[in-house]
Image (cartoon, rainbow, N blue to C red):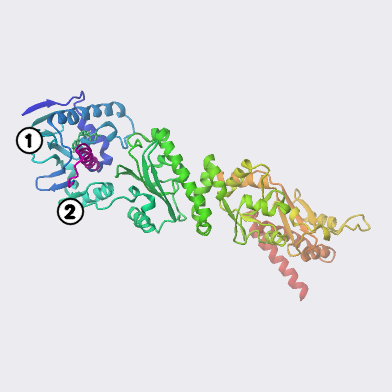
Amino acid sequence: MAKGTLSIHSENILPIIKKWLYSEKDIFVRELVSNATDAITKFKLISGIEDSFRIDITIDKPNRTLEFKDNGIGMTSEEVEKYIAQIAFSGAEEFIEKYQGKEEKEQIIGHFGLGFYSAYMASEKVEIETLSYLENEKPVFWACDGSSSYTIEEGTKVGRGTIVRLFIDKESDEYLEDNKIEEILRKFCAYLTYPIFLNGRHINNKDPLWIKNSSDATEKEYIEFYHDLYPLDPDPIFWVHINVDYPFNVKGILFFPKIHKRFDFSQSNIKLFCNRVFVSDNCKEILPDYLTVLKGAIDSPDIPLNVSRSYLQMDRTVKQLGQHVSKKICDKLSSLYKMDKEKFLSHFQDIEMIVKLGILNDDKFYERAKEFLVWKKTDGSWFTIEEYLEKNKEKTKGKVYYSTDEKMLSQFLSIYQQKGIDVILAGNFIDAPIISHLESKIDDLEFQRIDSHLDEMIDPSREKGLLDSDGKTEGSKIASFFRGQLPKDLEVEAKSLSTDDLPALLVLDEKMRRLRDYMQATQGKESAIPQKKTFVLNTNNKLIQKAFALQKSHPELAQDLARQVYDLALLSQKEIDPSEVSKILTQNTRILEKLAALVE
Ligand code: ADP
């Protein structure tokens, strides 16, 4: 028997490994299964032999051992010395130097060649029995109890391959339980290339769908695969199959899930694999933020999974991957929009967040997505902005009219409808920044909320322009009566509107209203930004005419009516201050009392 000393300076490497990596203890199983898989792949490549490859994991509870056995390439005694004793520990040394005193410890094991040594997170001793595939090599037995010395001698293993035997320590009893190991294997190794057996039971029996050619995979298979990954989810809407060889290697399938209201946009849902071994499902850094809604799996040996997250964000491969995925998503949406518009439109609500966030955050995405950025019209049909402008160019002269709410602004809507002007709905919270973004991108484009613009609502042909004996029009007299009853700084006008039904409306300056809404949305409180409001009375409306006429016979009622008309306009445009509501109700009751008294 030969003895050796591990080639490290630090005497206490294993306690450090245990302490540092404790929070991710389960992954030692993944690391050892990965090594076994690599060993089999290496043998396959070198020998060209197709054998019945397998990985056996065996729990021996009475003896407190957990074994990982493969029929891969095996190791000669020189290789054990070189790869296990020397390399791994020099990696460990680097690891300690780099990470001592730092917080970052995610996914660093493999990076520093510590994969094998993660076994010590759960063991007090590890043995290796191995026989190289090379002819005339002798079996090797290696053992190390976690101190810096190990033994190596001729072993007894028959048949090519390696057994790594863990003597589970007292704090890690759970790893002697079938259920525990099975749970870990199902999580990390479900899609592994070679069959894995736990105590003789086959655990993994599926090839991941991403390895198939997209042209060979059926819709049913995609949906089944999705449910494998997310058993509790409803069916996905559609998916994108990714297969890139250059400049990096990545395969995967990304799904658009049905998004429910409480969707957490800050969490990534994509499962990341490295050579079919599950690595993580919280790798936000891999894709641009606006794609975090996507679900699915990405498998890439090229993503540097083992380094810290801040580094990952800056990595070129990762950036390119994000851009590639983003392009594929746009291509998919674009082809769906062209080939199956009905499906696209019926799901637009589910995907609009991705599309709009992408547009706001990524110019390249915007360039691709503008052709399928659609808006719903109040009659239920859909437009792109280009189509809207083309269809309405005579009437709106480059303006796009929108409403944030179908019901709230319904009186305004009917005016636009009468005139045959299309109004799009833009009531999602993300629409405000999108509107500003589009205005900055497209020359001369101007969005106007339907209550911000009077021109379209006026019917000049009915304007009562006649001057009376005082040299005033009826309109100017109505305006001055109302002005007398309303807040001092309010601008009041009387106009001939194209509808008779609407008594009055507030015209809100588009830019100032947007700024105020933005401040409210971002700061969450009422902003003190002054608003440019014009209160416009409809000279064709009966209530306005009546209130004006009543000022001589019933001055108090006329004044109350004037104020009520104003308050109702505020209310219908959601401009009312909540503290004013009770005052309005009192005023309303007073009016009703007076009217009731009149008909007595
Ligand atoms: P890494 O896998 O990142 O190289 P490890 O510490 O996990 O680091 O393993 C070190 C080396 O030991 C491997 O590169 C491989 O050469 C060898 N090795 C580990 N496990 C096995 C195995 N089951 N069969 C053959 N060789 C192995």
Q: Which image quarter: residue 65?
A: top left
Is residue 38 within the magenta segment?
A: yes
Residue 242 in the image: above or below residue 4? below
Mark sitting on residue 155: 1
SS at mark 1 in the image: loop
User: Was residue 135 drawn as part of the magenta stretch in this picture?
Assistant: no
Number of other residues with Cα within 10 Å of mark 2, as a class: few under 14, some 14 to 19, many 20 or more: few
Q: Residue at x 61, y 44 (%)?
A: 438
Q: Which residue position is annotated with label 2?
A: 201
Name the kind of residue labelled 1 in the image: Gly
Q: How many marks?
A: 2
* Position of residue 426 in the picture relative to residue 297 (left or right): right
Quarter of the figure with residue 109? top left
With 156 as the anchor, is 389 left or right in this view? Answer: right
Distance of mark 1 from mark 2, alpha carbons? 28 Å
Question: Residue 506: where, in percent of width, then height?
Answer: 71, 54
Residue 28 is situated, as x and y percent measured from the top left of the image, at 23, 40
Instruction: Determine whether the beta carbon of the residue marked 1 sits less than 8 angstroms from the nearest atom of ligand 1.
Output: no
Q: Position of residue 567 (x, y in %)?
A: 69, 58
Residue 449 in sight from this viewpoint? no
Residue at image point 8% right, 39% down: 157
**Residue 449 locus on image (x, y percent):** 66, 52
Q: Is residue 264 above or below residue 411?
A: above
Q: Taking the image as four quarters, which one is ligand 1 found in? A: top left
**Contact (Cβ within 8 Å) of mark 1 with mark 2:** no
Residue, far front:
48
